Amino acid sequence: MNKIKNFFLKKYAQTVLASLVIFIAVWVVYANSIGNEFLWDDDAGIINNIYVHDWKYFLNFFSKSLYGGLGIVCAYWRPAVLSVFAVEWHTFLVWPGGYHIVNILLHGINALLIFYLFRLLFGRFWPAFGAALVFGVHPLNIEAVTYISGIADPLSALFILLGVIAYAKTEKETEYRRKRAFYLSVFLCFILALLSRESAVMMPGLLFLADIFNKRDKISNWRDIKNPLKKISFFLFVDAVYIVLRLTVMDFMKGIPVPSLNFPLYERILTFFHAFGIYIQLMFSPLHLHMEWVLPTAKTFMNPPVALGGFLIVIFIFLIFKTFRKLPEVSFGLAWFLIALSPYMNIFMPAVALLSEHWLYLSLPGFFFALFVFIDRISFPRFVRFFVLFSIIAWIFWVGNLTILRNRNWANPMVLFIDTLREAPKSYRANLNLGLAYQNDKQYDKALEYFERAMKIEPKNPFTYYDRALLYKIMGKEKEAMRDHEYSFSLDANNTRSTAFLLNYYSSKKEYSKIRVMLEHMLEITVKPVEREKILLRLISIANTEKNEASAKKYNEMLIDVRKEIQNDPIVKIGNFLNKYLGEIE
Protein backbone atom coordinates (compact mmCIF):
# COMPACT_ATOMS: atom_id res chain seq x y z
CA MET A 1 0.00 0.00 0.00
CA ASN A 2 2.83 2.39 0.90
CA LYS A 3 4.54 1.65 -2.42
CA ILE A 4 1.37 2.58 -4.33
CA LYS A 5 0.96 5.72 -2.20
CA ASN A 6 4.59 6.72 -2.78
CA PHE A 7 4.19 6.12 -6.52
CA PHE A 8 1.21 8.49 -6.77
CA LEU A 9 2.85 11.08 -4.52
CA LYS A 10 5.96 10.95 -6.69
CA LYS A 11 3.90 11.30 -9.87
CA TYR A 12 1.88 14.19 -8.38
CA ALA A 13 5.05 15.95 -7.18
CA GLN A 14 6.61 15.51 -10.63
CA THR A 15 3.58 17.13 -12.30
CA VAL A 16 3.50 20.03 -9.82
CA LEU A 17 7.24 20.65 -10.23
CA ALA A 18 7.00 20.55 -14.03
CA SER A 19 4.03 22.95 -13.96
CA LEU A 20 5.96 25.36 -11.73
CA VAL A 21 8.97 25.24 -14.07
CA ILE A 22 6.77 26.04 -17.09
CA PHE A 23 4.87 28.86 -15.36
CA ILE A 24 7.98 30.42 -13.81
CA ALA A 25 9.86 30.19 -17.12
CA VAL A 26 7.06 32.17 -18.82
CA TRP A 27 7.31 34.94 -16.20
CA VAL A 28 11.11 34.98 -16.33
CA VAL A 29 11.26 35.59 -20.10
CA TYR A 30 8.37 38.09 -20.21
CA ALA A 31 8.93 39.98 -16.93
CA ASN A 32 10.96 42.72 -18.64
CA SER A 33 7.97 43.52 -20.90
CA ILE A 34 5.85 44.76 -17.96
CA GLY A 35 7.53 48.17 -18.15
CA ASN A 36 6.86 48.54 -21.89
CA GLU A 37 4.59 51.32 -23.15
CA PHE A 38 1.41 51.21 -25.21
CA LEU A 39 2.17 51.02 -28.93
CA TRP A 40 0.85 50.35 -32.43
CA ASP A 41 -2.88 49.47 -32.27
CA ASP A 42 -3.10 49.90 -28.48
CA ASP A 43 -4.27 53.48 -29.06
CA ALA A 44 -7.11 52.42 -31.36
CA GLY A 45 -8.10 49.38 -29.30
CA ILE A 46 -7.80 50.81 -25.79
CA ILE A 47 -6.57 54.37 -25.20
CA ASN A 48 -8.85 56.19 -27.69
CA ASN A 49 -11.60 53.56 -27.99
CA ILE A 50 -14.64 55.06 -26.24
CA TYR A 51 -16.43 51.69 -26.27
CA VAL A 52 -14.08 50.23 -23.64
CA HIS A 53 -14.19 53.36 -21.48
CA ASP A 54 -17.88 53.16 -20.61
CA TRP A 55 -20.06 50.09 -20.02
CA LYS A 56 -23.02 51.84 -21.67
CA TYR A 57 -21.43 50.82 -24.99
CA PHE A 58 -21.35 47.12 -24.04
CA LEU A 59 -23.91 46.08 -26.68
CA ASN A 60 -21.76 47.82 -29.31
CA PHE A 61 -19.09 45.19 -28.62
CA PHE A 62 -21.37 42.74 -30.47
CA SER A 63 -22.52 44.99 -33.32
CA LYS A 64 -19.41 46.99 -34.22
CA SER A 65 -15.85 46.18 -35.27
CA LEU A 66 -12.93 46.09 -32.82
CA TYR A 67 -11.97 49.73 -33.43
CA GLY A 68 -15.52 50.99 -33.88
CA GLY A 69 -15.20 53.16 -30.78
CA LEU A 70 -12.68 55.26 -32.67
CA GLY A 71 -14.78 55.44 -35.83
CA ILE A 72 -12.34 53.20 -37.71
CA VAL A 73 -13.55 50.46 -40.05
CA CYS A 74 -11.62 47.20 -39.61
CA ALA A 75 -12.19 43.53 -40.38
CA TYR A 76 -12.05 42.34 -36.76
CA TRP A 77 -15.21 41.45 -34.82
CA ARG A 78 -14.00 40.46 -31.35
CA PRO A 79 -16.54 41.16 -28.57
CA ALA A 80 -14.61 39.04 -26.05
CA VAL A 81 -11.44 41.08 -26.63
CA LEU A 82 -13.36 44.34 -26.18
CA SER A 83 -14.84 42.93 -22.96
CA VAL A 84 -11.37 42.15 -21.61
CA PHE A 85 -10.10 45.58 -22.67
CA ALA A 86 -13.05 47.20 -20.86
CA VAL A 87 -12.33 45.29 -17.64
CA GLU A 88 -8.64 46.16 -17.93
CA TRP A 89 -9.41 49.84 -18.61
CA HIS A 90 -11.61 50.11 -15.53
CA THR A 91 -8.90 48.35 -13.49
CA PHE A 92 -5.63 49.81 -14.83
CA LEU A 93 -6.70 52.89 -16.84
CA VAL A 94 -3.50 54.06 -18.63
CA TRP A 95 -1.00 51.91 -16.71
CA PRO A 96 0.36 49.57 -19.42
CA GLY A 97 1.97 47.27 -16.85
CA GLY A 98 -1.41 45.90 -15.81
CA TYR A 99 -2.29 44.97 -19.39
CA HIS A 100 1.08 43.26 -19.83
CA ILE A 101 0.56 41.24 -16.63
CA VAL A 102 -2.81 39.98 -17.93
CA ASN A 103 -1.23 38.89 -21.25
CA ILE A 104 1.61 37.06 -19.48
CA LEU A 105 -0.83 35.38 -17.09
CA LEU A 106 -3.00 34.14 -19.98
CA HIS A 107 0.08 32.86 -21.82
CA GLY A 108 1.32 31.03 -18.72
CA ILE A 109 -2.07 29.38 -18.21
CA ASN A 110 -2.12 28.30 -21.87
CA ALA A 111 1.32 26.70 -21.49
CA LEU A 112 0.01 24.71 -18.50
CA LEU A 113 -3.12 23.69 -20.43
CA ILE A 114 -0.98 22.40 -23.31
CA PHE A 115 1.07 20.35 -20.84
CA TYR A 116 -2.12 18.95 -19.31
CA LEU A 117 -3.89 18.24 -22.63
CA PHE A 118 -1.00 16.40 -24.28
CA ARG A 119 -0.53 14.29 -21.15
CA LEU A 120 -4.27 13.63 -20.93
CA LEU A 121 -4.36 12.26 -24.46
CA PHE A 122 -1.11 10.29 -24.50
CA GLY A 123 0.36 10.14 -21.01
CA ARG A 124 3.79 11.19 -22.35
CA PHE A 125 5.30 13.37 -19.60
CA TRP A 126 8.58 14.63 -21.04
CA PRO A 127 7.43 15.42 -24.61
CA ALA A 128 4.38 17.24 -23.21
CA PHE A 129 6.60 19.14 -20.77
CA GLY A 130 9.09 20.04 -23.51
CA ALA A 131 6.38 21.24 -25.91
CA ALA A 132 4.72 23.37 -23.21
CA LEU A 133 8.06 24.84 -22.11
CA VAL A 134 9.09 25.75 -25.66
CA PHE A 135 5.65 27.27 -26.25
CA GLY A 136 6.05 29.30 -23.09
CA VAL A 137 9.45 30.85 -23.88
CA HIS A 138 9.64 30.96 -27.70
CA PRO A 139 10.09 34.49 -29.18
CA LEU A 140 7.63 33.79 -32.01
CA ASN A 141 4.91 34.38 -29.42
CA ILE A 142 6.07 37.91 -28.56
CA GLU A 143 3.51 39.50 -30.89
CA ALA A 144 0.79 37.68 -28.96
CA VAL A 145 2.15 38.27 -25.44
CA THR A 146 4.41 41.35 -25.23
CA TYR A 147 2.11 43.29 -27.58
CA ILE A 148 -0.94 44.31 -25.51
CA SER A 149 -3.31 44.27 -28.51
CA GLY A 150 -2.07 40.78 -29.34
CA ILE A 151 -4.28 39.41 -26.53
CA ALA A 152 -6.69 37.93 -29.09
CA ASP A 153 -4.26 35.02 -29.62
CA PRO A 154 -3.83 33.90 -25.99
CA LEU A 155 -7.49 34.63 -25.20
CA SER A 156 -8.88 32.51 -28.05
CA ALA A 157 -6.24 29.81 -27.35
CA LEU A 158 -7.39 29.68 -23.72
CA PHE A 159 -10.97 28.87 -24.74
CA ILE A 160 -9.88 26.46 -27.49
CA LEU A 161 -7.61 24.50 -25.13
CA LEU A 162 -10.25 24.37 -22.38
CA GLY A 163 -12.80 23.19 -24.97
CA VAL A 164 -10.53 20.45 -26.36
CA ILE A 165 -9.72 19.25 -22.82
CA ALA A 166 -13.43 19.10 -21.92
CA TYR A 167 -14.15 17.28 -25.20
CA ALA A 168 -11.42 14.71 -24.50
CA LYS A 169 -12.81 14.16 -21.00
CA THR A 170 -16.32 13.34 -22.28
CA GLU A 171 -14.99 9.98 -23.51
CA LYS A 172 -13.82 9.11 -20.03
CA GLU A 173 -17.17 9.98 -18.44
CA THR A 174 -19.95 7.42 -18.03
CA GLU A 175 -22.36 9.45 -15.90
CA TYR A 176 -24.88 11.24 -18.17
CA ARG A 177 -25.10 14.53 -16.29
CA ARG A 178 -21.35 15.03 -16.17
CA LYS A 179 -21.05 14.05 -19.84
CA ARG A 180 -23.72 16.62 -20.77
CA ALA A 181 -21.99 19.27 -18.62
CA PHE A 182 -18.72 18.65 -20.47
CA TYR A 183 -20.46 19.01 -23.87
CA LEU A 184 -22.10 22.27 -22.78
CA SER A 185 -18.74 23.59 -21.60
CA VAL A 186 -17.19 22.69 -24.98
CA PHE A 187 -19.93 24.63 -26.78
CA LEU A 188 -19.48 27.65 -24.47
CA CYS A 189 -15.71 27.58 -25.03
CA PHE A 190 -16.23 27.42 -28.80
CA ILE A 191 -18.52 30.47 -28.78
CA LEU A 192 -16.11 32.43 -26.58
CA ALA A 193 -13.19 31.44 -28.82
CA LEU A 194 -15.07 32.71 -31.91
CA LEU A 195 -15.84 35.95 -30.08
CA SER A 196 -12.13 36.31 -29.34
CA ARG A 197 -10.56 35.65 -32.74
CA GLU A 198 -11.76 34.62 -36.20
CA SER A 199 -9.20 31.83 -36.51
CA ALA A 200 -11.15 29.84 -33.88
CA VAL A 201 -13.21 28.45 -36.77
CA MET A 202 -10.64 25.64 -36.84
CA MET A 203 -11.56 24.47 -33.30
CA PRO A 204 -13.89 21.68 -34.59
CA GLY A 205 -10.84 20.26 -36.40
CA LEU A 206 -8.93 20.07 -33.11
CA LEU A 207 -11.96 18.48 -31.40
CA PHE A 208 -12.10 15.86 -34.12
CA LEU A 209 -8.37 15.27 -33.76
CA ALA A 210 -8.61 14.78 -29.98
CA ASP A 211 -11.56 12.40 -30.44
CA ILE A 212 -9.97 10.09 -33.02
CA PHE A 213 -6.70 9.88 -31.07
CA ASN A 214 -8.68 9.13 -27.90
CA LYS A 215 -10.22 6.19 -29.82
CA ARG A 216 -7.21 5.31 -31.97
CA ASP A 217 -7.30 1.66 -30.86
CA LYS A 218 -10.85 1.35 -32.17
CA ILE A 219 -10.17 2.91 -35.58
CA SER A 220 -9.25 0.30 -38.16
CA ASN A 221 -10.56 1.90 -41.39
CA TRP A 222 -12.07 5.10 -42.76
CA ARG A 223 -15.61 4.07 -41.76
CA ASP A 224 -14.63 4.24 -38.11
CA ILE A 225 -14.22 8.01 -38.25
CA LYS A 226 -17.91 8.55 -39.10
CA ASN A 227 -18.92 8.78 -35.45
CA PRO A 228 -16.25 11.39 -34.54
CA LEU A 229 -17.37 13.38 -37.59
CA LYS A 230 -21.01 13.18 -36.52
CA LYS A 231 -20.07 14.41 -33.05
CA ILE A 232 -18.52 17.60 -34.42
CA SER A 233 -21.31 18.20 -36.99
CA PHE A 234 -23.07 20.64 -34.65
CA PHE A 235 -19.85 22.64 -34.19
CA LEU A 236 -19.38 22.69 -37.97
CA PHE A 237 -22.94 24.05 -38.26
CA VAL A 238 -22.07 26.81 -35.76
CA ASP A 239 -18.97 27.52 -37.87
CA ALA A 240 -21.13 27.84 -40.99
CA VAL A 241 -23.54 30.24 -39.26
CA TYR A 242 -20.62 32.32 -37.99
CA ILE A 243 -19.02 32.50 -41.44
CA VAL A 244 -22.32 33.51 -43.08
CA LEU A 245 -22.82 36.26 -40.48
CA ARG A 246 -19.26 37.53 -40.99
CA LEU A 247 -19.76 37.62 -44.75
CA THR A 248 -23.08 39.48 -44.50
CA VAL A 249 -24.29 41.32 -41.40
CA MET A 250 -20.90 41.49 -39.69
CA ASP A 251 -18.87 42.27 -42.83
CA PHE A 252 -17.38 45.61 -41.76
CA MET A 253 -15.04 45.69 -44.76
CA LYS A 254 -17.84 45.53 -47.34
CA GLY A 255 -16.60 47.16 -50.50
CA ILE A 256 -13.02 47.37 -49.19
CA PRO A 257 -10.72 44.84 -50.94
CA VAL A 258 -8.68 42.37 -48.89
CA PRO A 259 -5.07 42.57 -50.19
CA SER A 260 -4.38 38.86 -49.59
CA LEU A 261 -7.28 37.90 -51.91
CA ASN A 262 -6.35 40.19 -54.79
CA PHE A 263 -4.71 37.34 -56.71
CA PRO A 264 -5.85 33.88 -57.94
CA LEU A 265 -6.36 30.89 -55.64
CA TYR A 266 -3.44 28.87 -57.07
CA GLU A 267 -1.09 31.82 -56.42
CA ARG A 268 -2.35 32.05 -52.83
CA ILE A 269 -1.62 28.33 -52.38
CA LEU A 270 1.88 28.69 -53.81
CA THR A 271 2.54 31.75 -51.64
CA PHE A 272 1.48 29.78 -48.56
CA PHE A 273 4.00 27.08 -49.55
CA HIS A 274 6.68 29.78 -49.42
CA ALA A 275 5.41 31.01 -46.03
CA PHE A 276 5.34 27.45 -44.67
CA GLY A 277 9.05 26.99 -45.25
CA ILE A 278 9.75 30.27 -43.43
CA TYR A 279 7.57 29.16 -40.49
CA ILE A 280 9.61 25.95 -40.10
CA GLN A 281 12.85 27.91 -40.25
CA LEU A 282 11.65 30.47 -37.67
CA MET A 283 10.62 27.77 -35.20
CA PHE A 284 14.21 26.48 -35.08
CA SER A 285 16.06 29.75 -35.65
CA PRO A 286 13.86 32.71 -34.57
CA LEU A 287 16.19 35.47 -35.75
CA HIS A 288 15.40 38.76 -37.55
CA LEU A 289 11.83 38.77 -36.24
CA HIS A 290 9.51 41.67 -37.05
CA MET A 291 5.83 42.47 -37.65
CA GLU A 292 6.08 43.54 -41.28
CA TRP A 293 6.82 40.39 -43.28
CA VAL A 294 6.33 40.98 -47.00
CA LEU A 295 6.23 37.98 -49.34
CA PRO A 296 6.25 38.26 -53.12
CA THR A 297 3.24 36.61 -54.72
CA ALA A 298 4.38 33.17 -55.93
CA LYS A 299 3.65 32.56 -59.61
CA THR A 300 5.23 29.15 -60.12
CA PHE A 301 6.03 26.00 -58.16
CA MET A 302 9.52 26.04 -59.67
CA ASN A 303 10.57 28.82 -57.31
CA PRO A 304 12.93 27.03 -54.81
CA PRO A 305 11.37 28.43 -51.55
CA VAL A 306 7.90 27.57 -52.87
CA ALA A 307 8.92 24.06 -53.90
CA LEU A 308 10.61 23.49 -50.51
CA GLY A 309 7.53 24.62 -48.60
CA GLY A 310 5.26 22.43 -50.74
CA PHE A 311 7.59 19.46 -50.23
CA LEU A 312 7.54 19.98 -46.45
CA ILE A 313 3.73 20.04 -46.41
CA VAL A 314 3.63 16.76 -48.36
CA ILE A 315 6.11 15.26 -45.84
CA PHE A 316 3.92 16.43 -42.94
CA ILE A 317 0.79 14.87 -44.44
CA PHE A 318 2.64 11.63 -45.26
CA LEU A 319 3.97 11.36 -41.69
CA ILE A 320 0.52 12.04 -40.20
CA PHE A 321 -0.87 8.93 -41.90
CA LYS A 322 2.30 6.85 -41.71
CA THR A 323 2.79 7.25 -37.96
CA PHE A 324 -0.88 7.02 -36.91
CA ARG A 325 -0.46 3.48 -35.53
CA LYS A 326 3.15 3.20 -34.41
CA LEU A 327 3.81 6.80 -33.33
CA PRO A 328 0.35 8.32 -32.75
CA GLU A 329 1.83 11.25 -30.79
CA VAL A 330 3.86 12.32 -33.84
CA SER A 331 0.80 11.98 -36.07
CA PHE A 332 -1.28 14.01 -33.62
CA GLY A 333 1.31 16.77 -33.17
CA LEU A 334 1.83 17.32 -36.91
CA ALA A 335 -1.93 17.23 -37.56
CA TRP A 336 -2.45 19.74 -34.71
CA PHE A 337 0.17 22.01 -36.31
CA LEU A 338 -1.54 22.00 -39.72
CA ILE A 339 -5.10 22.37 -38.38
CA ALA A 340 -4.17 25.27 -36.08
CA LEU A 341 -2.37 26.97 -38.99
CA SER A 342 -5.16 26.33 -41.54
CA PRO A 343 -7.06 29.64 -41.04
CA TYR A 344 -3.96 31.54 -42.16
CA MET A 345 -3.43 29.73 -45.45
CA ASN A 346 -5.43 32.39 -47.37
CA ILE A 347 -7.21 29.50 -49.02
CA PHE A 348 -10.34 28.84 -46.96
CA MET A 349 -10.73 32.33 -45.47
CA PRO A 350 -9.03 35.70 -46.08
CA ALA A 351 -6.19 36.89 -43.84
CA VAL A 352 -4.92 40.45 -43.62
CA ALA A 353 -1.36 39.41 -44.56
CA LEU A 354 0.55 36.55 -46.16
CA LEU A 355 2.80 35.70 -43.21
CA SER A 356 2.81 36.67 -39.55
CA GLU A 357 4.82 35.29 -36.64
CA HIS A 358 1.97 35.19 -34.12
CA TRP A 359 -0.07 32.94 -36.42
CA LEU A 360 2.07 30.09 -35.09
CA TYR A 361 0.84 30.73 -31.54
CA LEU A 362 -1.33 27.61 -31.23
CA SER A 363 0.44 25.59 -33.95
CA LEU A 364 3.90 25.69 -32.39
CA PRO A 365 3.30 23.32 -29.41
CA GLY A 366 1.92 20.60 -31.69
CA PHE A 367 5.05 20.63 -33.82
CA PHE A 368 7.44 20.42 -30.87
CA PHE A 369 5.37 17.72 -29.17
CA ALA A 370 5.73 15.59 -32.31
CA LEU A 371 9.44 16.38 -32.54
CA PHE A 372 10.19 15.53 -28.89
CA VAL A 373 8.23 12.26 -29.08
CA PHE A 374 10.15 11.30 -32.21
CA ILE A 375 13.51 12.06 -30.54
CA ASP A 376 12.43 10.21 -27.38
CA ARG A 377 11.60 7.07 -29.38
CA ILE A 378 14.98 6.89 -31.12
CA SER A 379 17.39 4.44 -29.47
CA PHE A 380 20.50 6.59 -29.08
CA PRO A 381 23.69 5.34 -27.40
CA ARG A 382 23.92 6.74 -23.88
CA PHE A 383 26.51 9.44 -24.62
CA VAL A 384 24.62 10.52 -27.78
CA ARG A 385 21.37 10.70 -25.81
CA PHE A 386 23.10 12.91 -23.23
CA PHE A 387 24.42 15.17 -26.01
CA VAL A 388 20.95 15.45 -27.62
CA LEU A 389 19.36 16.29 -24.26
CA PHE A 390 22.04 18.88 -23.51
CA SER A 391 21.55 20.43 -26.99
CA ILE A 392 17.77 20.69 -26.49
CA ILE A 393 18.19 22.34 -23.07
CA ALA A 394 20.81 24.75 -24.46
CA TRP A 395 18.52 25.60 -27.39
CA ILE A 396 15.57 26.29 -25.03
CA PHE A 397 17.77 28.63 -22.96
CA TRP A 398 18.87 30.33 -26.20
CA VAL A 399 15.34 30.99 -27.50
CA GLY A 400 14.26 32.11 -24.02
CA ASN A 401 17.11 34.61 -23.98
CA LEU A 402 16.09 35.82 -27.46
CA THR A 403 12.62 36.50 -26.06
CA ILE A 404 14.07 38.58 -23.21
CA LEU A 405 16.23 40.55 -25.64
CA ARG A 406 13.42 41.08 -28.14
CA ASN A 407 11.05 42.36 -25.46
CA ARG A 408 13.38 45.39 -25.25
CA ASN A 409 12.63 46.19 -28.90
CA TRP A 410 8.98 46.55 -27.86
CA ALA A 411 9.78 49.03 -25.08
CA ASN A 412 8.15 52.01 -26.80
CA PRO A 413 6.86 52.96 -30.27
CA MET A 414 10.05 54.68 -31.44
CA VAL A 415 12.32 51.75 -30.54
CA LEU A 416 9.90 49.23 -32.11
CA PHE A 417 9.47 51.02 -35.43
CA ILE A 418 13.17 51.82 -35.83
CA ASP A 419 13.89 48.12 -35.24
CA THR A 420 11.13 47.08 -37.66
CA LEU A 421 12.48 49.36 -40.39
CA ARG A 422 15.92 47.74 -40.04
CA GLU A 423 14.31 44.46 -41.11
CA ALA A 424 11.59 45.87 -43.42
CA PRO A 425 12.64 49.34 -44.72
CA LYS A 426 9.80 49.38 -47.27
CA SER A 427 7.07 48.84 -44.69
CA TYR A 428 4.35 51.46 -45.10
CA ARG A 429 2.96 50.92 -41.61
CA ALA A 430 6.34 51.09 -39.87
CA ASN A 431 7.28 54.35 -41.64
CA LEU A 432 3.90 55.91 -40.87
CA ASN A 433 3.95 54.81 -37.25
CA LEU A 434 7.51 56.01 -36.73
CA GLY A 435 6.38 59.37 -38.09
CA LEU A 436 3.57 59.41 -35.51
CA ALA A 437 6.06 58.48 -32.78
CA TYR A 438 8.31 61.42 -33.76
CA GLN A 439 5.24 63.68 -33.84
CA ASN A 440 4.30 62.65 -30.29
CA ASP A 441 7.89 63.38 -29.30
CA LYS A 442 7.55 66.85 -30.93
CA GLN A 443 10.26 66.09 -33.50
CA TYR A 444 8.10 67.49 -36.29
CA ASP A 445 10.70 67.58 -39.07
CA LYS A 446 11.52 63.89 -38.50
CA ALA A 447 7.80 63.10 -38.41
CA LEU A 448 7.30 64.84 -41.76
CA GLU A 449 10.22 62.89 -43.24
CA TYR A 450 8.70 59.50 -42.33
CA PHE A 451 5.19 60.50 -43.41
CA GLU A 452 6.63 61.33 -46.84
CA ARG A 453 8.49 58.01 -46.92
CA ALA A 454 5.18 56.26 -46.24
CA MET A 455 3.54 58.26 -49.06
CA LYS A 456 6.17 57.09 -51.53
CA ILE A 457 5.41 53.47 -50.61
CA GLU A 458 1.60 53.89 -50.76
CA PRO A 459 0.86 57.17 -52.57
CA LYS A 460 -2.90 56.58 -52.62
CA ASN A 461 -3.43 55.77 -48.95
CA PRO A 462 -5.80 58.43 -47.51
CA PHE A 463 -4.76 57.94 -43.88
CA THR A 464 -1.22 59.19 -44.50
CA TYR A 465 -2.55 62.50 -45.80
CA TYR A 466 -4.91 62.75 -42.84
CA ASP A 467 -2.03 62.20 -40.40
CA ARG A 468 0.17 64.72 -42.23
CA ALA A 469 -2.72 67.22 -42.17
CA LEU A 470 -2.81 66.97 -38.38
CA LEU A 471 0.96 67.50 -38.27
CA TYR A 472 0.69 70.56 -40.52
CA LYS A 473 -2.02 71.89 -38.18
CA ILE A 474 0.33 71.52 -35.19
CA MET A 475 3.10 73.25 -37.19
CA GLY A 476 0.74 76.17 -37.96
CA LYS A 477 0.53 75.38 -41.70
CA GLU A 478 -3.26 75.73 -42.13
CA LYS A 479 -3.33 75.79 -45.95
CA GLU A 480 -1.22 72.65 -46.25
CA ALA A 481 -3.42 70.94 -43.64
CA MET A 482 -6.64 71.74 -45.56
CA ARG A 483 -5.03 70.58 -48.82
CA ASP A 484 -4.15 67.21 -47.27
CA HIS A 485 -7.61 66.79 -45.71
CA GLU A 486 -9.28 67.48 -49.07
CA TYR A 487 -6.93 65.11 -50.91
CA SER A 488 -7.54 62.41 -48.27
CA PHE A 489 -11.29 62.78 -48.83
CA SER A 490 -10.85 62.61 -52.61
CA LEU A 491 -9.00 59.29 -52.21
CA ASP A 492 -11.64 57.77 -49.95
CA ALA A 493 -14.84 59.52 -48.95
CA ASN A 494 -15.45 56.74 -46.41
CA ASN A 495 -12.34 57.91 -44.56
CA THR A 496 -14.39 59.06 -41.59
CA ARG A 497 -11.63 61.12 -39.99
CA SER A 498 -10.90 63.56 -42.84
CA THR A 499 -14.55 63.53 -43.85
CA ALA A 500 -15.69 64.48 -40.34
CA PHE A 501 -13.06 67.22 -40.13
CA LEU A 502 -14.06 68.78 -43.47
CA LEU A 503 -17.79 68.60 -42.75
CA ASN A 504 -17.32 70.30 -39.38
CA TYR A 505 -14.98 72.90 -40.84
CA TYR A 506 -17.30 73.82 -43.73
CA SER A 507 -20.26 73.85 -41.35
CA SER A 508 -18.50 76.32 -39.05
CA LYS A 509 -17.82 78.55 -42.09
CA LYS A 510 -21.41 78.05 -43.38
CA GLU A 511 -20.07 76.83 -46.73
CA TYR A 512 -23.12 74.66 -47.40
CA SER A 513 -22.44 74.20 -51.11
CA LYS A 514 -19.17 72.42 -50.30
CA ILE A 515 -20.91 70.24 -47.73
CA ARG A 516 -23.56 69.31 -50.30
CA VAL A 517 -20.92 68.34 -52.89
CA MET A 518 -19.18 66.14 -50.30
CA LEU A 519 -22.38 64.44 -49.16
CA GLU A 520 -23.60 63.81 -52.72
CA HIS A 521 -20.26 62.17 -53.52
CA MET A 522 -20.58 60.03 -50.39
CA LEU A 523 -24.11 59.09 -51.39
CA GLU A 524 -22.90 57.81 -54.76
CA ILE A 525 -20.33 55.43 -53.26
CA THR A 526 -22.21 54.32 -50.13
CA VAL A 527 -23.75 50.83 -50.37
CA LYS A 528 -25.52 50.27 -47.05
CA PRO A 529 -29.10 51.67 -47.03
CA VAL A 530 -28.83 52.68 -43.36
CA GLU A 531 -25.78 54.82 -44.10
CA ARG A 532 -27.46 56.30 -47.19
CA GLU A 533 -30.41 57.26 -45.01
CA LYS A 534 -28.12 59.24 -42.67
CA ILE A 535 -26.52 61.08 -45.61
CA LEU A 536 -29.90 61.95 -47.13
CA LEU A 537 -31.21 63.30 -43.82
CA ARG A 538 -28.19 65.61 -43.66
CA LEU A 539 -28.70 66.69 -47.29
CA ILE A 540 -32.35 67.48 -46.55
CA SER A 541 -31.27 69.57 -43.57
CA ILE A 542 -28.83 71.54 -45.74
CA ALA A 543 -31.42 72.03 -48.48
CA ASN A 544 -33.87 73.37 -45.88
CA THR A 545 -31.19 75.69 -44.47
CA GLU A 546 -30.51 77.03 -47.97
CA LYS A 547 -34.30 77.16 -48.62
CA ASN A 548 -33.76 75.09 -51.76
CA GLU A 549 -37.19 73.44 -52.13
CA ALA A 550 -36.33 71.55 -55.33
CA SER A 551 -33.31 69.87 -53.75
CA ALA A 552 -35.24 69.13 -50.57
CA LYS A 553 -38.00 67.45 -52.60
CA LYS A 554 -35.49 65.36 -54.58
CA TYR A 555 -33.72 64.18 -51.42
CA ASN A 556 -37.03 63.35 -49.71
CA GLU A 557 -38.07 61.18 -52.66
CA MET A 558 -34.74 59.37 -52.50
CA LEU A 559 -35.19 58.94 -48.75
CA ILE A 560 -38.53 57.20 -49.27
CA ASP A 561 -36.90 54.67 -51.62
CA VAL A 562 -34.00 54.06 -49.24
CA ARG A 563 -36.36 53.48 -46.32
CA LYS A 564 -38.24 50.91 -48.40
CA GLU A 565 -34.93 49.11 -48.94
CA ILE A 566 -34.28 49.17 -45.21
CA GLN A 567 -37.72 47.77 -44.39
CA ASN A 568 -37.26 44.96 -46.92
CA ASP A 569 -33.91 44.03 -45.42
CA PRO A 570 -34.37 40.56 -43.79
CA ILE A 571 -32.07 41.48 -40.90
CA VAL A 572 -34.21 44.54 -40.15
CA LYS A 573 -37.35 42.39 -40.31
CA ILE A 574 -35.89 39.96 -37.77
CA GLY A 575 -34.90 42.88 -35.53
CA ASN A 576 -38.39 44.41 -35.74
CA PHE A 577 -39.97 41.04 -34.94
CA LEU A 578 -37.74 40.58 -31.89
CA ASN A 579 -38.46 44.11 -30.66
CA LYS A 580 -42.18 43.53 -31.04
CA TYR A 581 -41.99 40.11 -29.35
CA LEU A 582 -39.92 41.41 -26.44
CA GLY A 583 -42.27 44.39 -26.10
CA GLU A 584 -45.26 42.06 -25.80
CA ILE A 585 -43.46 40.04 -23.08
CA GLU A 586 -42.82 43.22 -21.09
Image (cartoon, rainbow, N blue to C red):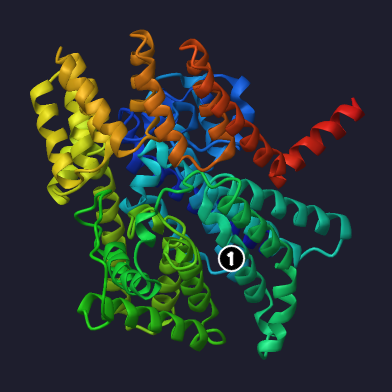
- Evaluate whether residue 14 shows in this view: no
Residue 476 rendering spot, x and y as whole percentages: 15, 12
Q: Does 457 sit left or right of 55 as displayed? A: left
Instruction: Give the class, few, some or many, for how many residues have Cα within 10 Å of label 1's Cα (few <14, many ≥20).
Output: many
Residue 229 picture quarter? bottom right
The quarter holding residue 455 reads top left
Tag 1 residue: 206
Instruction: Residue 523 in the image: state x and y as whole percent.
Output: 47, 35
Tell me what residue is drawn at x 56 percent, y 23 percent.
537
Residue furthest to the right: 585
Give the total of numbered labels: 1
Q: Would residue 387 be seen by someone viewing this image from the given angle?
A: yes
Which element is circle 1 on? helix
Q: Nearer the viewer, residue 515 or 412?
A: 515
Judged from this view, the residue extending furthest toward the front is 550
Please indicate whether residue 438 sits to the left or right of residue 39 in the image.
Answer: left
Q: Quadrant of residue 379?
A: bottom left
Q: Quadrant of the N terminus?
A: bottom right
Q: Compared with residue 126, is residue 562 higher up or lower down, i.e. above or below?
A: above
Residue type highlighted by circle 1: Leu
Identify the residue at image location x=77%, y=52%: 184
Q: Position of residue 36 (x, y in %)?
A: 30, 30
Up-down relation of residue 279 to residue 99 (above or below):
below
Measured along the vertical axis of the image, is residue 239 above or below residue 464? below
x, y percent for residue 103: 45, 38
Examine the rendered structure and indicate whether residue 288 appears above or below residue 389.
Answer: above
Along the line of sight, the residue nearer the viewer: 265 or 38: 265
Image quadrant occupied by the C terminus: top right
